[in-house]
Amino acid sequence: MSTKTLYDKLWDQHLVKQRDDGSALIYIDLQLLHEVTSPQAFEGLRMANRKPWRISGNLATPDHNVPTTKNERREGVNGIADPVSKIQVVTLDENCDEFGITEFNMMDERQGIVHVVGPEQGATLPGMTVVCGDSHTSTHGAFGALAHGIGTSEVEHVLATQCLVQKKNKNMLVRVDGELSPYVSAKDVVLAIIGEIGTAGGTGYVIEFGGTGIQSLSMEGRMTVCNMAIEAGARVGLIAVDQTTIDYVEGRPYAPKGEQWDQAVEAWKDLVSDEGAHFDNVVVLKAEDIKPQVTWGTSPEMVIAIDQAIPRSEDQTDPVLKEGYARAWKYMGLEGKSVLADITLDRVFIGSCTNSRIEDLRIAAEVVKGRQVAESLKQAIVVPGSGLVKAQAEAEGLDEIFTQAGLEWREPGCSMCLAMNADKLGNGEHCASTSNRNFEGRQGFGGRTHLVSPAMAAAAAIAGHFVDVNELVKH
Amino acid sequence: MRAFTQHQGIVAPLDLANVDTDMIIPKQFLKSIKRTGFGKNLFDELRYEDEGQPDQECTGRPLREDFVLNQAKYAGSSVLLARRNFGCGSSREHAPWALDDYGFRVVIAPSFADIFFNNCFKNGLLPIQLSEENVEQLFQEVANEDGYALSIDLEAQTVTTQSGTSFSFDVDDFRKHCLLNGLDDIGLTLQDQDAIKSYEAERQQSAPWLFVNKG
Ligand code: SF4
């Protein structure tokens, strides 16, 4: 068998040692670090008197805990009001100093959400293995890189050895054929995929996303798709390298230059699955069938198209689903509601490692431009993914468009995606959110999250409830 | 790492599918820079009526009476019985830390999310995958009998009920070996440091762009 999938190739290129028991030692090219999952790993290193194996194989930035209001940010770590959050951010600064690891700290314009920062800097390159103590590390698979989230013990393991002990996963291909409709974005595509295969559909697999519906996406869009591979149960999402990938990487600060660039591009051209390569599972979706998606429940698989009725527990046959739906209905307060438009929204959040890149902000701005946020809304915030995304958006005047429409323009960070800082939902509040998880309590105690694309979140902010963005822009 | 060989303990049934790591340990408790002390906040939102805060004393907080861990008959349980896709969501290792700190040594479910599954082994916590039918049978048995306990033998790869029924489970050799002997992964990997060095040297030649210095 000489044909290989992209995953097979990446695996083979990083295999340091195959062990007899079926496990393998895999070399890690890049580890990204943030303040929440690294302190215990650094502590472990210190306790065992170990040094990082290769310092240049690491890059750090705080993101989960950092405040996103100008006032708090002005003073850097000292401005963090929550003392516990502050300790974590300070600890990251200290650990990076002590071990000599490059960190974009809170005062650095390059600071941002790790998964936005890595690609933006060209730290993430095609053909790499990338890990981070964060499940959305799958994002970097958009570059044809083998990237996945790990736990803190493994963060320590990679710091100490630049390797991970792994077992090979199975290959799954998710193909999206055809052409996407207007205002149907990468987010809708990946939500539709999760709706199709379920949140455990990809467990044990590496998912490669392919087909014209994927190839036509920008790098930003591809990152959105791979970001949510983990929400389909797959630790890794992958997209083959093509000209779009190479054009995005060229000229980035850590990308190769000159002769090395040519050499790298030559090598990257092979980062595709061979014709006829074997996949253990293949799922095909038609791009034309995908409509703007909205989650109604407390799991990303509880998702429907904007024009569908909210599914009811009593219509389910599987007892586990029946129970799960009933619980979700109760938590989400859906009694007496039948369609998404019946839900009154309290807040709108545009941001997170799923949708906080420049393209996401451009489309949201396009939708709200010249319109006003619904009066019934308590808050609508836009949180750019990094300091550089923020600067770019401001250079294009997007911040003005947002603030004129009544949305708040914030400083970069994870923010309301997981509500570790002050940005959070109140008990029972409904939020249209461009993030990736609608779990119970994810955005705040008792908060009710509905996952949508940036265009749909923007449209919801204007209407005060969910609407098909295509309808809204017509008027 | 603490070794795991055999264990016998009371079973707590958590009859819920897709239990995610946000449920196991909500994010406000992730602000700790330690590995211990998470047990009192395990399943915080399911367990208490109010919203928990880090560093808060938990005795005296209002309990959700219907939650499994709040029921007297499951006091002292150390085997958690759960439904499919247990541990999905965030990669936080705080989830196995919290389960461990609370006193769980084993989690049994029909399926687990990959990262959580992997994280358990690093912390001497044994995740056991049994078929949907076997898990269903255990849920029924635990509902019918107070003080229901199971015996787990990692060496033999079996889960045995008090009436003597035995289910076998799979576990891969490397993980089993590490868990049985309480081995530290890093130490093991460093035994292969020559292999890592020669791999690195070769890669530096063939793909030098992977080794840029970040400054
Ligand atoms: S934006 Fe949300 S999902 Fe992404 S890294 Fe931050 S907290 Fe995690």
Image (spheres, helix red, strand yellow):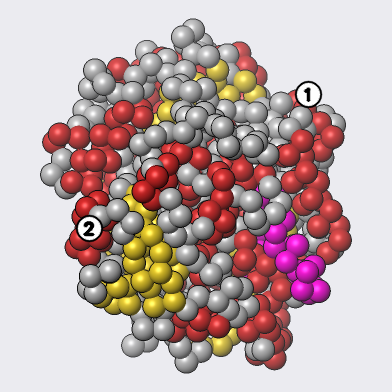
Residue A299 located left or right of residue B187: left
- Pick whichever, B210 or B158, lies toward us: B158
| Local SS, label 2 | helix
- Pick whichever, A394 or A352, lies toward us: A352
Task: Identify the subunit bearing mark 2.
Answer: B
Query: Mark 1: few, some, or many residues within 10 Å (few <14, many ≥20)?
Result: few
Task: Identify the subunit bearing mark 1.
Answer: A
Amino acid on which the number 2 mark rests in the picture: Glu
Q: Are marks 2 and 1 on the same chain?
A: no
Tell me where residue A402 sits by quadrant.
top right
Q: Residue at x 61, y 13 (%)?
A: A404
| Local SS, label 1 | helix
Residue that numbered label 2 is attached to:
B141
Residue that numbered label 1 is attached to:
A71
Q: Residue A381, relative to residue A78: is it above or below?
A: above
- Residue B101, given in percent of the width and then of the height, sits at 57, 56
Q: Residue A78, relative to residue A333: is it above or below?
A: below
Which stretch is magenta? Answer: A27-52
